[in-house]
Image (cartoon, rainbow, N blue to C red):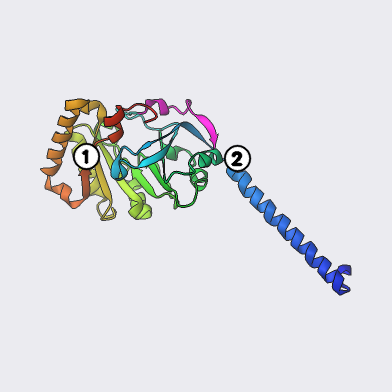
Amino acid sequence: MHPLCNDEGGVQNERALFVRRLRRGRLAAGANIRSMLTAATVRVNETFFSVQGEGSLAGAPSFFIRLDGCPLRCSWCDTPYALEGTAGTETDVAALGALARGVNRVVITGGEPLAQDIGPLIAAFVPGTHVTVETSGAIFADLPLVSLFSVSPKVGTSNYTPKLAVLRKYCATAGSRLQLKFVIGDERDLAEALACLESIADSLPRATPVILQPESGRAGTGESYHAFMRDLTERFLGDARWRRFDARVLPQLHYLLWGGEPGR
């Protein structure tokens, strides 16, 4: 018998010792988790508070975290300052989580956010925060805590083609947490967007929002933008094949309001 257990007082002493050790172990485990979270960083190009300018949540106030770096070089990229991966700052995910406190919606964008490990970043937000990840659809990630994957397959004028295998994986794993967003610069883009949807139709959840938005460089500003939107909408409405999908034409709200100004 253990010497501490040879009387009632010994039993109590051993129990107290066990409880102290258990508490120390729990504290150490908690400290390790906090340490791991604190040690995780992502390369951030900019953060800002604005309205979501694109997609089904357009107009919703959101805190944006733009990560730095992208493997693609789309011909019409509207955030070239976030491409190279050399302009950003390594930032602790816990600090970003603190910045996002008090907001209902966070948007992780880029660059290409999935070129980095964003799992620890998403875990740093207050539970219940709506998290949108805006991605090109070139990289797959299964992240259960993401509220919305806003996937923008590249077509035609981008000089890229959609990665259908990656899109099917998102269809299988994201389900109702998925929207597809196509940037349209000309008739070819519109045709390739439709062809992409038809190719994955057997995998695409029925109610998936599909957004067609003008490529701002070609659309221009003022009346030019309005004319581009009008033409795109009329072409969309005139092709019955689009009615198979939950598709709609939408402008870039932040472009209309601020003309593509960084931090907006």
The spot of residue 113 in percent (x, y) is 43, 38
Q: Is residue 167 magenta?
A: no
* Residue 130 visible in the displayed image: yes
Q: Is residue 190 left or right of residue 261?
A: left
Q: Pick the residue in front: 199 or 57.
A: 57
Query: Magenta segment range?
Result: 79-92
Helix, strand or loop for disc 1: helix
Q: Does residue 42 appear to the left or right of 72 in the view shown? A: right
Upstream in sequence: badge 2 or badge 1? 2
Q: Quadrant of residue 195?
A: top left
Kindly identify which residue carries mark 2. Answer: 39
* Disc 2, SS: helix
Which residue is painted at 39% across and 29% down in the image?
A: 263
Q: Amino acid at mark 2?
A: Ala
In front of the other: 116 or 35 = 35
Residue 17 lies, in percent from the top left, at 80, 62
Residue at mark 1 = 192
The answer to whether residue 75 is seen in the rendering is no
Which amino acid lies under the numbered mark 1 shown in the image of this protein? Glu
| Residue found at x 25% / y 29% | 216
Q: Is residue 89 magenta?
A: yes
Quadrant location of the C terminus in the rendered image: top left
Q: Residues within 10 Å of mark 2 (few under 14, many from 20)?
A: few
Is residue 112 shown left or right of residue 245? right
Q: Nearer the viewer, mark 2 or mark 1?
A: 2
Residue 88 x %, y %: 49, 28
As drawn, the residue found furthest toward the bottom would be: 7
Residue at the front extreme of this rendering = 102
Locate residue 185: give its quadrant.
top left
Image mark for residue 137: none
Q: Is residue 66 above or below residue 125?
A: above
